Amino acid sequence: MPNILEVSQLSKTYQSGTKALTVLSDISFSIEPGDKLSIVGSSGSGKTTLLGLCAGLDRASSGSVILNGTKLDSLNEDERARVRNLHVGFVFQNFQLLPTLTALENIMVPMELRGEKGIKDRAMDLLARVGLAERHDHYPTQLSGGEQQRISIARAFSNRPKILFADEPTGNLDEETSVKIESLLFDLNRELGTTLVLVTHDNELAKKTDRVIQLKGGRIISNSLNQALEV
């Protein structure tokens, strides 16, 4: 089976006035469908930048990203957005729910944008899967942090993504809530066959994935199976 994600000699440099800041250098790795991968490293190591390039949110300075058979670096912004809408789900540290919409409406938005039918029933089914069917008419401000993250996970799975990118999904949550969110992510990953790519500072969470890539100074210093880390 072909890899779901192939990253080859990826580099990212930002220009700031006359100075160039290289955030990532010569990053290469691949992920098979259904795998669970963690990307770890200290603040400033390039984790979130790498996640954004893999998901097609930004374009690399050099190198290539092939996502589900599509080479992202040859696409314009609209074309990359189309690939994301079809194949990618996102979970962020700060939830990124729309405050003027209910829990149900937040899940329905991406389905509406794709022009899908029967979206209310599917959104309610997703809410039930994350244990929040009874909170469907609540707004984000009426929900706890853990509940908001469960809503964002339901939204992320609304397009049945081939690959889910999660950037510090438990970063704003207490330990007990974090454990529940981790279980939910892994359960849905297994149930739906979605590939999972996590950026995390949490070594205990990283150990629960199949493989761990460790970044330092924008370079990969370790790419190994279930290895205890010193970050």
Image (tube, grey):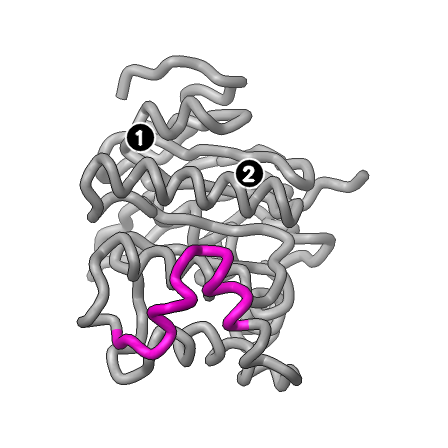
What secondary structure is marked by label 2? strand
The answer to which of marks 1 and 2 sits earlier in the sequence is 2
Residue 157 percent across, percent down from the top left: 54, 60
Which of the 4 image quarters holds residue 98? Answer: bottom left
Numbered mark located on residue 9 in the image? 2
Mark 1 vs 2: CB contact within 8 A:
no
Q: What segment carries the magenta color?
A: 123-139
Residue 116 percent across, percent down from the top left: 64, 82
Residue 11 percent across, percent down from the top left: 45, 44
**Residue occupying image coordinates x 42% and y 22%:** 207
Q: How far is mark 1 from mark 2, CA to CA?
A: 19 Å
Label 1: few (<14), some (14–19) or many (≥20) C-alpha neighbours in 10 Å: many
Amino acid carrying mark 1 in the image: Gly
**Residue occupying image coordinates x 20% and y 61%:** 17
Nearer the observer, 111 or 78: 111
What secondary structure is marked by label 1? loop
Q: Is residue 142 above or below residue 227?
A: below
Numbered mark located on residue 3 in the image? none
Amino acid carrying mark 2 in the image: Gln
**Residue occupying image coordinates x 37% and y 68%:** 134
> Can you say which quadrant of the picture contains the C terminus?
top left
Which residue position holds label 1?
41
**Residue occupying image coordinates x 64% and y 42%:** 6
